[in-house]
């Protein structure tokens, strides 16, 4: 965390930069997390500020080129940017708790979205395989076409059951009690969607690889999810944390479940 903020009276001065700000080209505000006390790596001492993007000292440096063009992810900088004390969101030094309020919900939302897109790819592949008949024989009559789709459909069914159960447990017992299950849903769903869109491209042949079908776009979009809402490795770290007892199932102090 290289971005820092220093207080003088009622004003905070922020200096630093942040890569990967999705939607920043349209945003009226940005939630800036800066170090206000402690040392690098400390969990406390980070503060969240709600900053209007038209504040002097804020600059959109560049939009970052990605696998999924056109991009909507920017890198921004803060140079002697001044905000009042009242722009602190969630309490001084408590930015980690702010983030912990929404990451579980985001992760399961993303899992459900990837599952839906995966199911779409499977359904479209089945429909196409029934219709397309190279040399007069429907693609669907080949086990080489059927079996990979059967594997994907089986994984989709199992994942759907886990997502439903986990969402119910989040509502009933609180998200932190099943944070590991949320992470399982997340990394399995994002991977499943990449596998299903890849298979859909294969079943649709050249057409599948083209932009006349949505599969290559689904692949590019959901490939990102294996990195952004906590990488696959970070999801596994959480599962391992609960499995081996390094992490607590209780919500951290100050975070509602
Ligand atoms: C398209 C896109 C949009 C984004 N939008 C936003 C946004 O709107 N807001 C925002 O705040 N961020 C956003 N991000 C940033 C995103 O959250 C980070 O890229 C992500 O959390 C990974 O951090 P990193 O890139 O610094 O990777 P690093 O932390 O440098 O990790 C690099 C690799 O090492 C692995 N790794 C790290 N530690 C370990 C470990 N202990 N054991 C094993 N492997 C490990 C990681 O899993 C990863 O694969 C976005 C990123 C992208 C690509």
Image (spheres, rainbow, N blue to C red):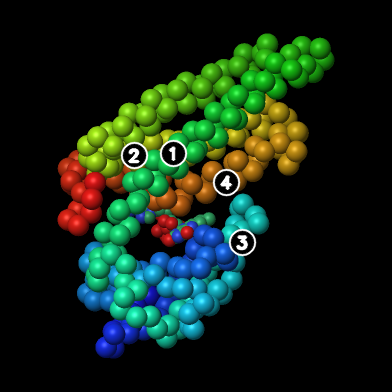
Visible residue check, residue 241: no
- Mark 1 is surrounded, within 10 Å at the Cα level, by few (under 14), some (14 to 19) or many (20 or more) other residues, namely many
Q: Position of residue 110 (x, y in %)?
A: 45, 42
Give the mark, 4 or 2, whose residue is nearer the N terminus: 2
Along the horizontal axis of the image, is 251 left or right of 119?
left
Q: Position of residue 177 (x, y in %)?
A: 22, 40
Q: Is mark 1 within 8 Å of ligand 1?
A: no
**Which numbered disc covers residue 111?**
1
User: Which type of secondary structure does the marked residue at label 1 adopt?
Assistant: helix
- Cβ atoms under marks 1 and 3 closer than 8 Å: no
Residue bearing mark 3: 65
- Mark 4 is surrounded, within 10 Å at the Cα level, by few (under 14), some (14 to 19) or many (20 or more) other residues, namely some
- Mark 2 is surrounded, within 10 Å at the Cα level, by few (under 14), some (14 to 19) or many (20 or more) other residues, namely many
Residue nearest the viewer, comparing 227 with 252: 252
Residue bearing mark 2: 182
Q: Position of residue 5 (x, y in %)?
A: 33, 79
Residue bearing mark 4: 221
User: Which type of secondary structure does the marked residue at label 4 adopt?
Assistant: helix
- Mark 3 is surrounded, within 10 Å at the Cα level, by few (under 14), some (14 to 19) or many (20 or more) other residues, namely few
């Amino acid at each position: 965390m290289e971005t820092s903020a220093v207080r003088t009276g009622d004003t905070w001065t922020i200096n630093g930069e942040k890569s990967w700000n999705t939607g920043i080209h349209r945003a009226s505000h940005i939630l800036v997390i800066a170090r206000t006390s402690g040392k690098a790596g400390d969990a406390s001492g980070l503060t969240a500020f709600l900053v209007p993007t038209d504040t002097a000292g804020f600059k959109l440096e560049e939009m970052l080129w990605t696998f999924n063009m056109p991009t909507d992810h920017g890198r921004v900088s803060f140079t002697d940017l001044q905000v009042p004390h009242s722009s602190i969101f969630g309490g001084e030094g408590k930015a980690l708790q702010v983030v912990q309020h929404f990451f579980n919900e985001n992760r399961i939302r993303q899992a459900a979205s990837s599952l839906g897109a995966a199911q779409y790819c499977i359904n479209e592949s089945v429909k196409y395989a029934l219709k397309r008949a190279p040399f007069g024989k429907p693609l669907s009559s080949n086990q080489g076409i059927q079996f990979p789709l059967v594997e994907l459909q089986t994984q989709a069914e199992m994942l759907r059951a886990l997502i439903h159960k986990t969402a119910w447990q989040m509502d009933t017992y609180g998200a932190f009690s099943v944070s590991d299950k949320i992470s399982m849903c997340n990394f399995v769903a994002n991977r499943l969607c990449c596998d299903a869109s890849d298979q859909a491209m294969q079943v649709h042949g050249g057409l599948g690889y083209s932009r006349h079908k949505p599969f290559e776009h689904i692949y590019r979009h959901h490939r990102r999810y294996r990195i952004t809402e906590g990488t696959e490795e970070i999801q596994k770290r959480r599962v391992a944390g609960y499995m081996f007892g390094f992490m607590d199932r209780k919500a951290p102090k100050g975070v509602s479940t």
